[in-house]
Amino acid sequence: MVHIFEVSPQKLVKETSEELKGKFEAPNWSIFVKTGTNKERPPQNQDWWHLRAASVLRTVYKDGPVGVSKLRSKYGSGKNRGVKPSKFTRASGNIIRKILQQLETSGLVQQQKIGVHKGRTITAAGTSLLSKAAKRVEK
């Protein structure tokens, strides 16, 4: 059996995003929004919502339990402030929150509290989805 970390993350996310297209749809407003205040334009890729959802699912598998705040920091980047030095800004929390809610309603992640850590963890269905995608990527 192929482990999720043995395949290329880019190929795994691409394959998983194809699976997620059948589970939920991107909101209507997603074609107009930027992914954060640090970006100048919306994403050019039409499937960016499902690609981000697949990436979030992999991150929850790898780092869980994880919350919106940690994911905002992960997907943030430097903001071009013109003549002034660049400064790190976090990604949009609304996008990440909606993606986590969609993953939760489709049964791939769940809210959990482990000790003092509270956030979302992956379910057995989510692990199975990632494992099957990793198996297809390796072939």
Image (cartoon, rainbow, N blue to C red):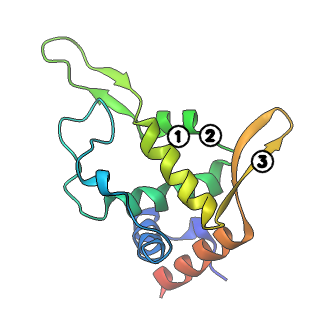
Vertical relation: 59 (above or below) 4: above
Residue picked out by circle 2: 67
Which numbered dot is residue 71? Answer: 1
**What percent of the width, then of the height, locates residue 117?**
77, 36
Describe the element under mark 1 as helix, strand or loop. helix
Describe the element under mark 2 as helix, strand or loop. loop
Vertical relation: 9 (above or below) 137: above
Residue drawn where x is 58% and y is 81% of the image: 132
Front position among marks 3 and 1: 3
Q: Are marks 1 and 2 in contact (CB under 8 Å)?
A: yes
Q: Amino acid at mark 3?
A: Gln
**What percent of the width, then of the height, locates residue 88?**
37, 23
Left or right placement of residue 45 versus residue 98 in this view: left
Categorize mark 1 by other alpha carbons within 10 Å: few (<14), some (14-19), many (20+).
some
Residue 109: quarter of image: bottom right
Left or right placement of residue 91 versus residue 135 in this view: left
Residue picked out by circle 3: 112
Residue drawn where x is 23% and y is 60% of the image: 45
Alpha carbon separation for disc pair 3 and 1 = 16 Å
Residue drawn where x is 24% and y is 63% of the image: 46
Residue 113: quarter of image: top right
Q: What residue occupies the far right of the structure in this picture?
A: 115
> Which quadrant does the N terminus fall into?
bottom right
Q: Amino acid at mark 2?
A: Gly
Q: Earlier in the sequence, mark 3 or mark 1?
A: 1
Q: Amino acid at mark 1?
A: Leu
